[in-house]
Amino acid sequence: MDTIPIRPNHTSKAIALLTIALLVFASCSHGHKQYTDAITNRDSIPGLTTYDIETLISDSGVVRYRILADRWDVYDQLNPSKWAFEEGVYLEKFSDSLTINATVKADTAYYFDQTKLWELYGRVHIENLEGEIFDTDTLFWNQDTERVWSDAFIRIEKANGTVITGYGFTSNQQFTDYRIRRTQGIFPIEENDRATRNAAGEIVADSTNNVVKS
């Protein structure tokens, strides 16, 4: 029996070419999507990660801060860019004479280097030069304006043992001149001491006296 060869007609060729084209298009599209995602997610990846750091930060040629952290991530592609200390941070602030006038610890911290703003979260613990202790779970610190503030609960233990608690807090960055809003408690206070408030109803305190004063 003779064998008669069967040749593909034009329709079969068209189907074959269409199938190849679809496969190539799908492959190219998939690769393009991955490339686009990589560009889009670039800002969520730190440009630099450093472990077990101890560094000094200078301003105008003067050493201002010493930072210790287990991990330091620099997000240079974010807008605004920031540093992240998500495994905790310890910071010492120096005076012009290089005396430590405040120490700060927090579970998590972010520093926005363009605006010089610190955001501190978790167990935020501060001690000033006078031995006063400040504890809260949220604190903001603007180095440009040299102001510190929080709307969260704060506990302040003064050097004489007096404890002040409240919601809302503003201070200078040395933590020596501060205001506590919505005060919840002041104890203990000697009988001849009394706490007074300013016109806004805030308790005004500083580190130069043993009593809370206006």
Image (spheres, rainbow, N blue to C red):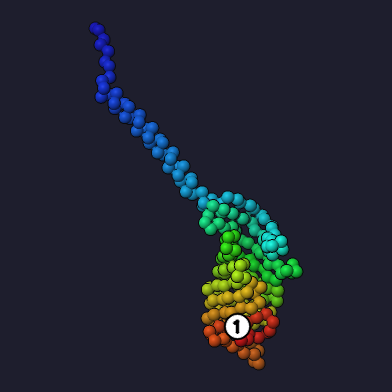
For residue 70, above or below residue 155: above
Spot occupied by residue 45 in the image (x, y as percentages of width and height): 54, 50
Task: Say which of 103 and 83 sits in front.
Answer: 83
Q: Residues within 10 Å of mark 1 (few under 14, many from 20)?
A: some
Spot occupied by residue 142 in the image (x, y as percentages of width and height): 59, 68
* Quadrant in the rendering for residue 18: top left
Going 35% across and 29% down the picture, which residue do you hit? 20
Say if residue 212 shows up in the picture: yes
The residue at the far left in this view is 1
Going 60% across and 83% down the picture, which residue do you hit? 204
Q: Mark 1 = which residue?
A: 204
Q: Amino acid at mark 1?
A: Val
Task: Say which of 148 and 72 sits in front.
Answer: 148
For residue 61, above or below residue 214: above
Say if residue 100 shows up in the picture: no
Spot occupied by residue 137 in the image (x, y as percentages of width and height): 56, 69
Task: Say which of 129 and 134 sits in front.
Answer: 129
Q: Seen in the image, is 176 located left or right of residue 185?
A: right
Instruction: Name the element at disc 1.
Output: strand
On the rendered image, what quadrant is the C terminus found in?
bottom right
On the rendered image, what quadrant is the N terminus found in?
top left
Spot occupied by residue 199 in the image (x, y as percentages of width and height): 54, 86
For residue 213, above or below residue 78: below
* Quadrant in the rendering for residue 157: bottom right
Q: Seen in the image, is 150 located left or right of residue 52?
A: left
Going 64% across and 92% down the picture, which residue do you hit? 191
The residue at the far bottom in this view is 192
Going 29% across and 27% down the picture, which residue do you hit? 15
Task: Say which of 135 and 19 sits in front.
Answer: 19
